[in-house]
Image (cartoon, rainbow, N blue to C red):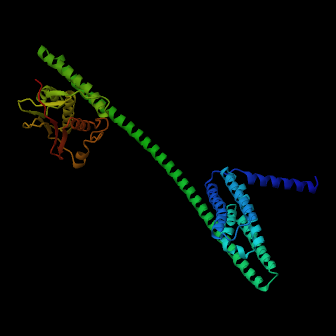
């Protein structure tokens, strides 16, 4: 292949590349859309300005009619400009800009060279700025190429004025001065547009970089939030495992205690010959077994998986029924006392839950009095609104920190495996759910008093 063939191939490739660039469809990027809106405004302004100029000329200067050739020329230029607008609407941005620059520069060249520079001086801003703005949309080098073309047109128009007056020195000076003024305006406008484009491009680049930094920061924060959420789920899982362990050990402790009661009744029953006493022992076994089933109910109540079964009953009858069970809970060195009025004290509550609450309070008091003491369950004087059950012991008591935390779930002062820490927590929740309250008073060395306050109800007939 010779040099001529290679040159032809390069030329053909360049032409094909130029055609693809000129006829490509506009993208949807923000900067491209902004340029398209700017060009649309420019095309509409130019497409309306030239016909309006003819209308104003005919209205303001009716004695000076517009030549038909000028009207035809203006109509052709206006039609091409609106054609550029239609191309822009179809996404052919590059082709619309190129055609707009070509027609405006050609129209300016024809007008300036035909009519001269002096007649165009009053309309130079309207005539010269639109092509500079259009060229800026394609880049800085197109802007300066358009400025050079306009300077050439201005110089040609000045030379036409000078030649029209046969090189009159006065005309030469005036035309040269006017050309210098208009050329300086073109250069100043081009420089201003160029600097504005550079600054705007810098701001856009800086804004894009800041947006990228914000996006990276957002992604990092999202990853940190996901990691924190994952850590929180792992912590909750670990806490659940710990709670399961506590519950398992506490349930085992409670069942062992109830089984000890059953074994105690059974051993006493084996050596008992009196039938009445045997019936009493069997009743104690049945009562202890019934309360063992309430242990699981207490755990279910804590997790709210099973509903309670409240009804109206007399607290005095409940305490009398609990007396044998409570006696079995305490060693011989603990004095057990009951103080209650002879009149009924009705409440609306789950009977098994209240029994278990009192058994838990008694069990805690027994552990707090290893060397003996006194445990008293009493019902204070009658109150028209409340029934208050007071469980008081003379054990070691609790300090301020223990007293503040004693109703928290899973909080216990017992050794590992000897309690769930749910007794007072569940009792407090149940009392509040019934419209009452659970109050705890204690001091180191002065014992503990727990008051269960429940709304008073009327016994059914």
Q: Is residue 191 above or below residue 412?
A: below
- Name the quarter where the C terminus is drawn: top left
Residue 456 quadrant: top left
Residue 31 shows in the view: yes
Residue 440, horizontal then vertical, whole percent: 18, 42
Residue 232, horizontal then vertical, whole percent: 43, 44
The reply, left or right, for residue 323 in relation to residue 406 is: left
- Give me the residue at 78% from left, 73% from top: 156
Residue closest to the eye, 238 or 354: 354
Q: Residue furthest front?
A: 63
Residue closest to the eye, 15 or 185: 185
- Give me the residue at 40% from left, 40% from top: 236
The reply, left or right, for residue 139 in relation to residue 427 is: right
Q: What count of labels does the image hold?
A: 0
Residue 274 shows in the view: no
Residue 398 quadrant: top left
Residue 244 quadrant: top left
Q: Residue furthest bottom?
A: 169
- Give me the residue at 17% from left, 45% from top: 442
Residue 284, horizontal then vertical, whole percent: 18, 22
Residue closest to the eye, 113 or 73: 73
Q: Is residue 426 above or below residue 5?
A: above
Q: Residue furthest right?
A: 2
Residue closest to the eye, 389 or 1: 1
Residue 164, horizontal then vertical, whole percent: 80, 78
The reply, left or right, for residue 314 in relation to residue 167 is: left
Q: Residue furthest left?
A: 342
């Amino acid at each position: 292949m010779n040099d001529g063939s290679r040159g032809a191939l390069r030329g053909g490739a360049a032409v094909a590349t130029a055609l693809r660039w000129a006829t490509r469809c506009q993208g949807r990027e923000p900067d491209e859309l902004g340029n398209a809106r700017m060009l649309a405004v420019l095309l509409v302004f130019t497409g309306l300005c030239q016909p309006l100029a003819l209308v104003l000329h005919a209205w303001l200067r009716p004695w000076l009619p517009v030549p038909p050739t000028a009207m035809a020329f203006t109509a052709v230029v206006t039609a091409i400009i609106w054609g550029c607008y239609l191309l822009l609407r179809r996404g052919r941005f590059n082709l619309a800009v190129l055609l707009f620059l070509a027609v405006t520069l050609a129209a300016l060249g024809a007008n300036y060279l035909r009519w001269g520079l002096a007649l165009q001086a009053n309309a130079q801003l309207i005539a010269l700025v639109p092509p500079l703005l259009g060229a800026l949309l394609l880049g800085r080098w197109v802007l300066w190429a358009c400025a050079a073309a306009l300077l050439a047109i201005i110089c040609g128009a000045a030379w036409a004025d000078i030649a029209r007056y046969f090189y009159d020195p006065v005309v030469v000076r005036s035309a040269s001065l006017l050309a210098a003024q208009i050329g300086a305006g073109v250069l100043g406008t081009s420089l201003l547009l160029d600097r504005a484009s550079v600054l705007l491009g810098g701001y856009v680049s800086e804004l894009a970089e800041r947006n990228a930094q914000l996006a990276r920061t957002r992604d990092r924060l999202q990853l940190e939030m996901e990691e924190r959420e994952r850590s929180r789920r792992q912590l909750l899982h670990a806490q659940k495992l710990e709670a399961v362990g506590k519950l398992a050990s506490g349930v085992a402790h409670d069942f062992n205690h109830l089984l000890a009661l059953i074994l105690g009744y059974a051993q006493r029953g084996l050596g008992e010959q009196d039938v009445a006493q045997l019936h009493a022992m069997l009743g104690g076994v049945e009562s202890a077994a019934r309360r063992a089933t309430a242990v699981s109910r207490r755990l279910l109540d804590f997790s709210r998986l099973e509903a309670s079964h409240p009804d109206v009953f007399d607290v005095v009858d409940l305490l009398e029924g609990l007396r044998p069970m409570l006696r079995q809970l305490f060693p011989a060195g603990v004095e057990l006392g009951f103080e209650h009025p002879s009149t009924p004290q009705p409440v609306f509550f789950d009977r098994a839950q209240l029994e278990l609450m009192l058994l838990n309070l008694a069990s805690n008091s027994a552990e707090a009095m290893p060397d003996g003491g006194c445990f008293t369950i009493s019902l204070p004087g009658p109150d028209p609104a409340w029934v208050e059950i007071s469980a008081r012991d003379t054990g070691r008591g609790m300090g301020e920190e223990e007293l503040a935390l004693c109703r928290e779930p899973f909080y216990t002062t017992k050794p590992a495996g000897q309690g769930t820490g749910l007794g007072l927590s569940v009792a407090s929740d149940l009392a509040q759910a019934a419209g009452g309250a659970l109050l705890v008073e204690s001091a180191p060395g002065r014992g503990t008093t727990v008051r269960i306050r429940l709304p008073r109800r009327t016994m059914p007939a």
